[in-house]
Image (tube, helix red, strand yellow):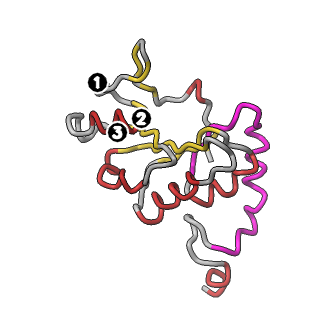
Amino acid sequence: MKFINAATCTWHHAVGEDGPKPDPDPAPNRLLTLEQWHAVKDHWPQDLKVAIEFPNDVDIRELAPDLHRIALVVLEFPKWTDGRAYSQAHLLRIRLKFKGAIRARGEVLVDMMQLLARTGFDEVILRGDQSPAFAQKALDLFEPVGFYQGDVAETRPWFLRSAA
């Protein structure tokens, strides 16, 4: 899991004086809202990789036709108790076979690290009061043993893995 510092991230929003530009010009490393993506996807170069901020109350399958053009999907946790982004990440990895990066942002806590990793996230922006060192410890907690249930990395349950 990569811990991203929002201030030093290589992906940049397309903003103007009054906020997000409704129809930004093509440029590398653009981090676009879903609305911006819908406005530009038909006329931007097909080989220009983008990052999309995807709301957690929209069906993630909406991105399916464009996944080959997307390098990063940023999923939002508006509250730490709102787990819809876990389902979105799982669908991206398992059903849609998305190979790009999936980032968690918002109310992301150390306690969420295991489930984030197991549902397909590979980058996080931790909430400001959370420690990356503690988050890494939480990730390493089950590393040597593993989990009984399958997840996005290993879909077989433990009893099928040990029989093989």
- What range of the chain is rendered magenta? 121-149
The answer to whether residue 40 is above or below residue 56 is above
Give the numbered dot on residue 102. none
Residue type at mark 1 is Asp
Quadrant the C terminus occupies? bottom right
Q: Residue placed at 69% from the left, 35% from the top? A: 127
Labels 2 and 3: the sequence-earlier one: 2
Give the numbered dot on residue 33. 2
The residue that disc 3 covers is 49
Residue 108, horizontal then vertical, whole percent: 67, 42
Residue type at mark 2 is Thr
Query: Marks 1 and 3, how far apart in space?
Result: 13 Å
Q: Residue placed at 29% from the left, 53% from the top? A: 65
Give the foreground label among 2 and 1: 2
Residue type at mark 3 is Lys
**Secondary structure of residue under mark 2:** strand
Depth order, front residue of 132/105? 105
State yes or no: discs 1 and 3 in contact (Cβ < 8 Å).
no
